[in-house]
Amino acid sequence: MKISAAQPVAALARIRARSDGEAVLWWWQGEVIGKRPGEIARHLMRITGIGFNRLSRLPDGLWESRMSEAGYYIDAGTGAFLDSWTNPWTGRVVTPPANRLRLRYLIEDNGTIRPSFPGAPFDGQVGAPLIIGDTVWSSERLAAQFPAPATPAVPGAPKGLAGEPMEVTHFCASLADVGNPRLGMVPATMSHTTMWSFYPWMGMEDNGGYVLSEIIGRKIAGPADIPTALRERIERDHPGFLASPDI
Protein backbone atom coordinates (compact mmCIF):
# COMPACT_ATOMS: atom_id res chain seq x y z
CA MET A 1 0.00 0.00 0.00
CA LYS A 2 1.03 3.60 -0.49
CA ILE A 3 1.43 5.51 2.78
CA SER A 4 -0.68 8.65 2.85
CA ALA A 5 -1.21 11.27 5.55
CA ALA A 6 -4.81 11.45 4.36
CA GLN A 7 -5.34 7.79 5.35
CA PRO A 8 -3.93 7.48 8.87
CA VAL A 9 -6.08 4.52 9.91
CA ALA A 10 -5.22 2.45 6.84
CA ALA A 11 -1.54 2.83 7.74
CA LEU A 12 -2.26 1.92 11.36
CA ALA A 13 -4.18 -1.18 10.30
CA ARG A 14 -1.26 -2.34 8.19
CA ILE A 15 1.32 -1.84 10.94
CA ARG A 16 -0.56 -2.53 14.18
CA ALA A 17 -2.74 -5.29 12.79
CA ARG A 18 -3.34 -6.78 9.33
CA SER A 19 -4.93 -5.25 6.25
CA ASP A 20 -7.26 -8.25 5.88
CA GLY A 21 -8.82 -7.69 9.31
CA GLU A 22 -7.51 -10.90 10.87
CA ALA A 23 -6.16 -10.86 14.42
CA VAL A 24 -2.46 -10.49 15.24
CA LEU A 25 -0.57 -11.12 18.46
CA TRP A 26 1.78 -8.75 20.28
CA TRP A 27 4.17 -9.51 23.14
CA TRP A 28 5.42 -6.67 25.33
CA GLN A 29 7.34 -5.83 28.49
CA GLY A 30 8.27 -2.66 30.32
CA GLU A 31 8.70 -0.60 33.45
CA VAL A 32 6.34 0.97 36.02
CA ILE A 33 7.47 4.21 37.65
CA GLY A 34 5.73 6.20 40.41
CA LYS A 35 5.98 9.92 41.13
CA ARG A 36 4.59 12.02 43.98
CA PRO A 37 4.68 15.84 44.04
CA GLY A 38 7.97 17.20 45.30
CA GLU A 39 9.73 13.84 45.18
CA ILE A 40 12.02 12.07 42.76
CA ALA A 41 10.39 9.34 40.67
CA ARG A 42 10.71 5.72 41.87
CA HIS A 43 11.06 2.56 39.80
CA LEU A 44 8.34 0.34 41.26
CA MET A 45 8.13 -2.86 39.23
CA ARG A 46 8.02 -4.24 35.72
CA ILE A 47 5.15 -5.45 33.58
CA THR A 48 4.79 -8.03 30.82
CA GLY A 49 1.98 -9.44 28.75
CA ILE A 50 0.43 -10.12 25.39
CA GLY A 51 -2.38 -8.63 23.36
CA PHE A 52 -4.44 -9.77 20.41
CA ASN A 53 -5.27 -6.93 18.00
CA ARG A 54 -7.75 -6.64 15.18
CA LEU A 55 -8.45 -3.52 13.10
CA SER A 56 -10.99 -3.86 10.31
CA ARG A 57 -13.02 -1.65 8.00
CA LEU A 58 -16.79 -1.75 8.53
CA PRO A 59 -19.39 -1.44 5.75
CA ASP A 60 -20.33 2.07 6.93
CA GLY A 61 -16.75 3.29 6.40
CA LEU A 62 -15.75 3.36 10.06
CA TRP A 63 -12.86 1.30 11.40
CA GLU A 64 -13.38 -1.11 14.29
CA SER A 65 -10.50 -1.65 16.72
CA ARG A 66 -10.61 -4.68 19.02
CA MET A 67 -8.02 -5.66 21.61
CA SER A 68 -7.88 -8.44 24.17
CA GLU A 69 -4.94 -8.48 26.56
CA ALA A 70 -3.49 -10.43 29.45
CA GLY A 71 -0.65 -8.97 31.50
CA TYR A 72 1.15 -9.27 34.81
CA TYR A 73 3.23 -7.16 37.14
CA ILE A 74 6.65 -8.68 37.76
CA ASP A 75 9.47 -8.03 40.20
CA ALA A 76 11.88 -5.35 39.00
CA GLY A 77 14.92 -7.40 39.96
CA THR A 78 14.05 -11.07 39.55
CA GLY A 79 11.33 -10.92 36.90
CA ALA A 80 9.12 -13.19 39.03
CA PHE A 81 5.36 -12.69 38.86
CA LEU A 82 4.23 -10.45 41.72
CA ASP A 83 1.59 -11.99 43.98
CA SER A 84 2.23 -9.28 46.57
CA TRP A 85 4.04 -5.94 46.62
CA THR A 86 5.15 -3.63 49.40
CA ASN A 87 4.19 -0.04 48.68
CA PRO A 88 7.42 1.97 49.30
CA TRP A 89 5.49 5.06 50.43
CA THR A 90 2.99 3.49 52.81
CA GLY A 91 4.77 0.27 53.79
CA ARG A 92 1.55 -1.65 53.17
CA VAL A 93 1.59 -5.03 51.43
CA VAL A 94 -0.90 -5.04 48.55
CA THR A 95 -1.87 -7.46 45.80
CA PRO A 96 -1.06 -6.39 42.22
CA PRO A 97 -3.93 -7.59 40.01
CA ALA A 98 -3.42 -9.63 36.89
CA ASN A 99 -4.57 -7.51 33.97
CA ARG A 100 -7.25 -8.94 31.68
CA LEU A 101 -8.62 -6.23 29.41
CA ARG A 102 -10.92 -6.24 26.42
CA LEU A 103 -11.42 -3.01 24.53
CA ARG A 104 -13.41 -2.04 21.45
CA TYR A 105 -13.70 1.36 19.83
CA LEU A 106 -14.55 2.91 16.48
CA ILE A 107 -12.26 5.16 14.45
CA GLU A 108 -13.30 7.62 11.75
CA ASP A 109 -11.38 7.68 8.49
CA ASN A 110 -9.68 10.95 9.50
CA GLY A 111 -8.25 9.28 12.61
CA THR A 112 -10.72 10.55 15.21
CA ILE A 113 -11.37 7.85 17.81
CA ARG A 114 -14.96 7.77 19.00
CA PRO A 115 -15.65 7.48 22.75
CA SER A 116 -16.35 3.96 23.97
CA PHE A 117 -17.82 4.95 27.34
CA PRO A 118 -20.70 7.48 27.21
CA GLY A 119 -20.45 9.93 30.08
CA ALA A 120 -16.67 9.76 30.47
CA PRO A 121 -14.62 12.69 29.13
CA PHE A 122 -12.53 11.32 26.28
CA ASP A 123 -10.13 12.39 23.54
CA GLY A 124 -8.50 10.07 21.02
CA GLN A 125 -6.70 10.38 17.70
CA VAL A 126 -4.74 8.28 15.24
CA GLY A 127 -1.85 10.39 13.99
CA ALA A 128 -0.77 10.78 10.39
CA PRO A 129 1.93 8.25 9.44
CA LEU A 130 5.48 9.57 9.62
CA ILE A 131 8.22 8.32 7.31
CA ILE A 132 11.78 8.57 8.64
CA GLY A 133 14.35 7.08 6.30
CA ASP A 134 13.30 3.53 5.47
CA THR A 135 10.85 3.21 8.38
CA VAL A 136 7.27 4.34 8.84
CA TRP A 137 5.67 5.26 12.16
CA SER A 138 2.00 5.29 13.10
CA SER A 139 0.65 6.55 16.42
CA GLU A 140 -2.43 6.45 18.63
CA ARG A 141 -3.30 8.84 21.45
CA LEU A 142 -6.04 8.15 24.02
CA ALA A 143 -7.08 10.19 27.06
CA ALA A 144 -10.06 9.64 29.35
CA GLN A 145 -11.41 10.36 32.82
CA PHE A 146 -13.09 7.66 34.89
CA PRO A 147 -14.84 8.14 38.26
CA ALA A 148 -13.15 7.28 41.53
CA PRO A 149 -14.08 3.83 42.88
CA ALA A 150 -16.53 5.31 45.42
CA THR A 151 -18.57 7.11 42.75
CA PRO A 152 -21.02 5.59 40.23
CA ALA A 153 -19.26 3.73 37.44
CA VAL A 154 -19.42 4.82 33.82
CA PRO A 155 -21.72 2.41 31.94
CA GLY A 156 -19.74 0.05 29.73
CA ALA A 157 -16.32 0.94 31.15
CA PRO A 158 -14.01 -1.99 31.94
CA LYS A 159 -14.32 -3.06 35.56
CA GLY A 160 -11.86 -1.44 37.92
CA LEU A 161 -10.93 1.59 35.78
CA ALA A 162 -10.58 4.82 37.73
CA GLY A 163 -8.55 7.99 37.32
CA GLU A 164 -7.37 10.01 34.34
CA PRO A 165 -5.31 7.88 31.93
CA MET A 166 -3.32 9.26 29.03
CA GLU A 167 -1.84 6.77 26.57
CA VAL A 168 0.42 7.24 23.57
CA THR A 169 1.49 4.33 21.37
CA HIS A 170 3.94 4.40 18.46
CA PHE A 171 4.09 1.54 15.96
CA CYS A 172 7.09 1.15 13.63
CA ALA A 173 7.68 -0.98 10.53
CA SER A 174 9.87 -1.12 7.45
CA LEU A 175 8.57 1.07 4.66
CA ALA A 176 9.36 -1.69 2.17
CA ASP A 177 7.40 -4.25 4.22
CA VAL A 178 4.38 -1.99 4.52
CA GLY A 179 4.36 -1.51 0.76
CA ASN A 180 4.83 -5.20 -0.05
CA PRO A 181 1.43 -6.67 -1.06
CA ARG A 182 2.77 -10.21 -0.63
CA LEU A 183 3.17 -9.70 3.12
CA GLY A 184 -0.08 -10.52 4.87
CA MET A 185 1.38 -9.61 8.26
CA VAL A 186 3.95 -6.82 8.41
CA PRO A 187 6.68 -7.30 11.06
CA ALA A 188 6.46 -4.39 13.48
CA THR A 189 7.57 -3.08 16.86
CA MET A 190 5.93 -0.64 19.23
CA SER A 191 6.48 1.59 22.22
CA HIS A 192 3.67 2.50 24.58
CA THR A 193 3.50 5.05 27.39
CA THR A 194 0.66 5.34 29.91
CA MET A 195 0.37 8.11 32.49
CA TRP A 196 -2.28 7.42 35.11
CA SER A 197 -3.30 8.39 38.61
CA PHE A 198 -2.02 5.96 41.24
CA TYR A 199 -3.96 2.73 40.78
CA PRO A 200 -6.57 2.09 43.49
CA TRP A 201 -4.97 -1.26 44.37
CA MET A 202 -1.76 0.53 45.38
CA GLY A 203 -3.52 1.97 48.44
CA MET A 204 -2.28 5.53 47.95
CA GLU A 205 -5.65 6.99 49.00
CA ASP A 206 -5.70 10.73 48.25
CA ASN A 207 -1.96 11.19 47.79
CA GLY A 208 -1.19 13.20 44.69
CA GLY A 209 1.02 11.87 41.96
CA TYR A 210 0.91 9.47 39.07
CA VAL A 211 2.15 6.20 37.63
CA LEU A 212 4.07 6.07 34.36
CA SER A 213 4.22 2.77 32.49
CA GLU A 214 6.58 2.44 29.54
CA ILE A 215 6.58 -0.72 27.47
CA ILE A 216 8.11 -1.95 24.25
CA GLY A 217 6.90 -4.87 22.19
CA ARG A 218 6.80 -6.64 18.88
CA LYS A 219 4.31 -8.43 16.71
CA ILE A 220 4.83 -12.19 16.91
CA ALA A 221 3.75 -15.10 14.73
CA GLY A 222 1.73 -16.88 17.40
CA PRO A 223 1.54 -18.18 20.98
CA ALA A 224 4.63 -20.37 20.50
CA ASP A 225 6.72 -17.18 20.39
CA ILE A 226 5.55 -16.01 23.83
CA PRO A 227 8.25 -16.49 26.52
CA THR A 228 7.65 -19.82 28.23
CA ALA A 229 6.94 -18.56 31.76
CA LEU A 230 4.44 -15.99 30.53
CA ARG A 231 2.73 -18.43 28.18
CA GLU A 232 2.35 -21.04 30.91
CA ARG A 233 0.93 -18.46 33.34
CA ILE A 234 -1.63 -17.26 30.80
CA GLU A 235 -2.62 -20.83 29.95
CA ARG A 236 -3.12 -21.54 33.65
CA ASP A 237 -5.11 -18.39 34.40
CA HIS A 238 -7.05 -18.16 31.13
CA PRO A 239 -7.50 -21.64 29.64
CA GLY A 240 -8.23 -21.56 25.92
CA PHE A 241 -7.53 -17.84 25.52
CA LEU A 242 -4.37 -18.21 23.45
CA ALA A 243 -5.94 -20.77 21.13
CA SER A 244 -9.22 -18.89 20.73
CA PRO A 245 -8.91 -15.18 21.59
CA ASP A 246 -12.13 -13.32 22.32
CA ILE A 247 -11.87 -10.63 19.68
Image: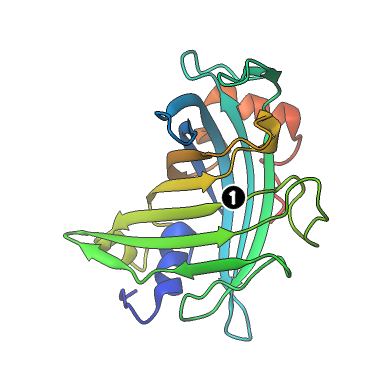
Q: Pick whichever, 87 or 7, lies toward us.
A: 87
Which residue corresponds to the image point at 37% horizontal and 64% vertical from the top-left? Answer: 182
Residue extending farthest to the front is 38
How many labels sit on residues?
Answer: 1
Residue extending farthest to the left is 133
Locate the C terminus by quadrant: bottom right
Image coordinates for residue 28, horizontal then vertical, percent: 48, 38
Q: How is the image coloured?
A: rainbow
Classify mark 1: residues with Cα within 10 Å, few (<14), some (14-19) or many (20+).
Answer: many
Residue extending farthest to the bottom is 60
Q: Can residue 20 be seen in this view?
A: no
What element does badge 1 sit on?
strand
Locate the N terminus by quadrant: bottom left
Q: Quadrant of residue 89?
A: top right
Q: Can residue 78 be seen in this view?
A: yes
Which residue corresponds to the image point at 71% horizontal and 65% vertical from the top-left? Answer: 117
Which residue corresponds to the image point at 56% horizontal and 16% vertical from the top-left? Answer: 80
Residue kind at label 1, given as amino acid type: Phe
Image coordinates for residue 50, horizontal then vertical, percent: 56, 40
Q: In which quarter of the image is residue 184?
A: bottom left
Relative placement, left or right, of 222 versus 97 is left
Image coordinates for residue 66, horizontal then vertical, percent: 63, 60
Q: Mark 1 points at which residue?
A: 52
Relative placement, left or right, of 62 versus 136 is right
